[in-house]
Image (cartoon, helix red, strand yellow):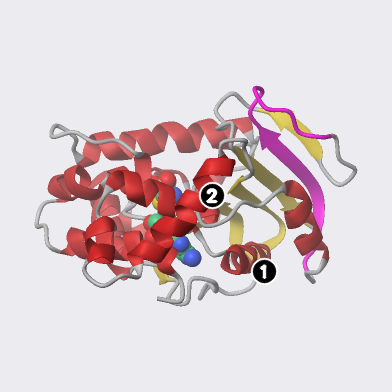
């Protein structure tokens, strides 16, 4: 209850436990990951959306230049494996980390069907902020549409964890959401929704509603400045930093990072792609 923004994930996790078929899980709660709904959805289609995105991002961020088949990837916020199955086909090892243990079980099932399950390790992020992964295990630490859903300090803690688990010479590719004009409305509405999630009976009912979830789980906005200030406090340093953003949104030039655009980046989002020194 200290972190009400976790409620929709935990609710979706419990719903996923009640279904036998992975296709039914996708039809019932798949929208929490890719915002798609429909009675004809199935796990194959769901994972193909993940495949499409991961290979587009790896290519755009120039992270596919080395031999991925020799590398370990840590994925923070894997959910039920929409992207994890594609990662497991490309990388030697994938460590899928998520807050919800039921999602991780489903993730294993997804990877067993559409990826290479022998390459998968899962990591339950029970406290929402630390990873049970050793220092320097990862060649690449990747996180997509996850940090924006964490409490502000948890998100910063996960950024520090991403830096810790990435080996020198390895990369982090972390996706953040930053402020937009529409947040003038969304931000207070999100606070009200999260307060309602705490109300007995109403909360659990509301947490299964798509619109309310989409409003309420927007738990933080992190700007490049704030992340940069946080990185400066860490014992881990980065040799190169690139910020990728949408060509339809202006970002101010920076001394600490190159700016690049990629059409595939949502206008509200930005990515930090940085090499550990
Ligand atoms: C929108 S989903 C994205 C999942 C996946 N990256 C994808 O694109 O399909 C966000 C995921 O982050 C997980 N999550 C939320 N807060 C988290 C935290 N503090 N630590 C780890 N995982 C978290 C949720 O359980 C959920 O699976």
Question: How far separated are the C-alphas under marks 1 and 2?
Answer: 31 Å
Q: Choose mark 1 or mark 2, whichever is in front.
A: 2
Crowd around label 2: few <14 · some 14–19 · many ≥20 (10 Å): some
Q: Is residue 92 left or right of residue 85?
A: right
Mark 1 and mark 2 lie on one chain; the one further toward the N terminus is: 1
Disc 2, SS: helix
Mark 1 neighbour class, 10 Å CA radius: few under 14, some 14 to 19, many 20 or more: many
Which stretch did the figure color magenta?
236-252
Residue at x-position 58% and y-position 74% = 134
Q: Residue at x 41, y 68 (%)?
A: 4
Can you tell me whether the CB of the residue at mark 1 lies under 8 Å from the nearest atom of ligand 1? no
Q: Judge whether residue 231 can be spotted in this image.
A: yes
Q: Quadrant of residue 231?
A: bottom right
Q: Quadrant of residue 103?
A: bottom left
Q: Which one is nearer the viewer's eye here, 223 or 132?
A: 223
Percent position of residue 244, x then y: 68, 35
Say which mark, if any, is on residue 164. Answer: 1
Q: Position of residue 185 (x, y in %)?
A: 53, 42
Ligand 1 appears in which quadrant? bottom left
Place residue 102 in its image quadrant: bottom left
């Amino acid at each position: 209850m200290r972190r009400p923004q976790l409620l929709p994930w935990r609710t979706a996790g419990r719903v996923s436990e009640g279904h036998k078929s992975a296709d039914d899980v996708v039809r019932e709660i798949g929208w929490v990951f890719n915002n798609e709904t429909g009675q004809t959805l199935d796990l194959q289609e769901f994972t193909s959306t993940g495949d499409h995105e991961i290979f587009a991002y790896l290519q755009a961020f120039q992270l596919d230049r080395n031999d991925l088949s020799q590398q370990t990837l840590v994925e923070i916020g894997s959910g039920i494996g929409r992207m994890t199955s594609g990662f497991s086909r490309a990388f030697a090892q994938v460590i899928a980390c998520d807050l919800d243990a039921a999602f991780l079980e489903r993730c294993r099932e997804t990877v067993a069907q559409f990826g290479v399950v022998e390459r998968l390790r899962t990591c339950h992020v029970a406290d929402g902020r630390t990873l049970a992964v050793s220092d320097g295990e990862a060649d690449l630490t990747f996180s997509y549409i996850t940090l924006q859903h964490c409490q502000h300090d948890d998100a910063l803690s996960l950024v520090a964890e991403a830096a810790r688990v990435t080996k020198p010479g390895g990369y982090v590719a972390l996706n953040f959401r930053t402020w937009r004009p529409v947040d003038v409305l969304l931000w207070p509405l999100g606070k009200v929704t999260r307060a309602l999630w705490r109300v007995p009976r109403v909360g659990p009912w509301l947490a299964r509603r798509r619109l309310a979830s989409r409003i309420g789980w927007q738990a933080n906005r992190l700007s490049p400045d704030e992340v940069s200030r946080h990185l400066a406090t860490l014992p881990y340093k980065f040799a190169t930093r690139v910020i990728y953003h949408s060509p339809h949104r202006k970002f101010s030039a920076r001394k600490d990072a190159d700016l690049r655009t990629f059409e595939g980046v949502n206008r509200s989002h930005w990515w930090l792609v940085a090499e550990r020194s």
